[in-house]
Amino acid sequence: MLIVLALSYLAASICFIVGIKWMNHPATARTGNRLSALGMTLAVVITMLNLAVAQQDLVKDASVLWSPQTRWALVLGGLVLGTVIGGVMAKTVKMTDMPQAVAIFNGLGGGAAAAVSVAGKVAPTPGAHGEEMLWSIVLGTIIGSITFAGSLIAFGKLQGLISGKPVTFPGMRLFNNLLILVTLGLGVWVMVLGHDPIGDKVFILTLVLANLFGIMLVLPIGGADMPVVISLLNSFTGTAAAITGFVLQNNVLIIAGALVGASGFILTMLMCKAMNRNLWNVMFVDFGGGGGSAGTIEGSQQETSAEDVAVMLAYASRVIIVPGYGLAVAQAQHAVQEMAVLLEKRGVSVKYAIHPVAGRMPGHMNVLLAEANVPYSLLYDMEDINSEFEQADVALVIGANDVTNPAARTDTSSPIYGMPILDVDKAKNIVVVKRGKGTGYAGIENLLYYNPKCKMLFADAKAAVSSLIAEVQHV
């Protein structure tokens, strides 16, 4: 029986590894997701069988708190409840709310890891009585708690329950640095004290401070930096899950958590590169501030109409569409796809330029456009599409702001200076669809809007694109 369990866990682990590998490419992402889900299903089933075997030993142990029947009722009840809630959320969540969903799922994963670690300290299982298990219990509690609390704040910011702007106070950076040092110090003290009653009290204080640090870590982060935060919290969730695997002595949980933690960390580094930040800056320095210089602004914004833009698009040879968060908010992805198909029928080459941090989570634009059945072959990453802007007759920017701002190249005093951007300003003609004249999440003016080649179409993204479709049909 033990051999069957071990081989089954190995099969589940292989599903996770191959599944994540396939998620690297849009064409195989769905299959990879299904394979990973199959691996998780297999892991759950095998864990349930393993629990059944373990229950036979618990029946003989008079010290257990609950009867085997009660334990089974709790496990099955949690399984059914989680399945129902997860299924409903997956079916009903809007694409515009996907970042919030990712944030809350991250938080629940971290909270679950912390809860298991706390249980391992308060009511240790036979395998967790040894002092050698305390390191995993303490680390799982700290990392899981930081993820849980931080993800709740991220959810609140994305949902609009908390201001999307940085929430700071004088000396916050120093406070946060001291807070994490004290939390880690108390964690070491818990490991030194072991299962001593005083150690239990210190452990509770460590738990509280870890949650407080999670809150303080995310509060000073602005909406523009949310992709970095979500990928970092995702890495924390995986790491906490892997550490929890040591607490439960479960190999498949260790492997799955390590995969999520490592992939999340790699993604975090890619997001940092895309935002021109380093990891220390992300974690311990106030960022996402907004405001600041945007260079010397010359000229004025030139407003245009749907009729003029339609003519420009209809007679173009090459069009590059740059989607952003404004497109997501307006749920204009289906209208954009319809417009692209209409232009392609007229012989226009249409491509999509995707910035790594466009939107509010990693891959937000890819997911959004995939829902509208935009062919994967038309989606181009920043490094692949930037060289083509010079040949583009029209660059159509829909809801993207900071990721197209030339100030990132020219203004050393700008808060986004050095951030890689899409070279929209090199296109022959530029059209920006925007709801108003407000600034982006970085809080600065976009120099692109004052470029003589740039025309502003002020309207809701979905309404604007619908108007363009109607006008193109009459050209």
Image (cartoon, helix red, strand yellow):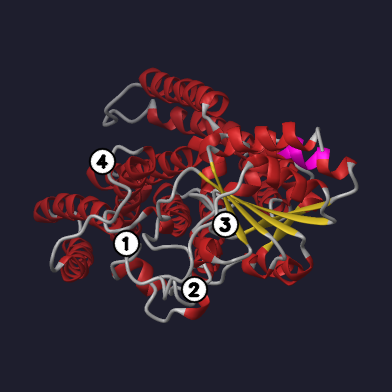
In magenta, the rendered stretch is 337-342
- Label placed on residue 123: 4
Mark-to-mark CA distance, 2 and 4: 54 Å
- Label 4, secondary structure: give it: loop
For the residue pair 138 and 126, the one nearer the viewer reads as: 138
Mark-to-mark CA distance, 2 and 1: 44 Å
For the residue pair 435 and 147, the one nearer the viewer reads as: 435
Mark-to-mark CA distance, 3 and 4: 28 Å
Q: Give the residue number, with chain letter if any, for mark 2.
A: 408
- Label 1, secondary structure: give it: helix
Q: Position of residue 73 (x, y in %)?
A: 41, 18
Q: Amino acid at mark 1?
A: Trp
Q: Earlier in the sequence, mark 2 or mark 1?
A: 1
Q: Give the residue number, with chain letter if any, for mark 3.
A: 259
Tell me, yes or no, if residue 35 can be seen here: no
Q: Amino acid at mark 2?
A: Ala
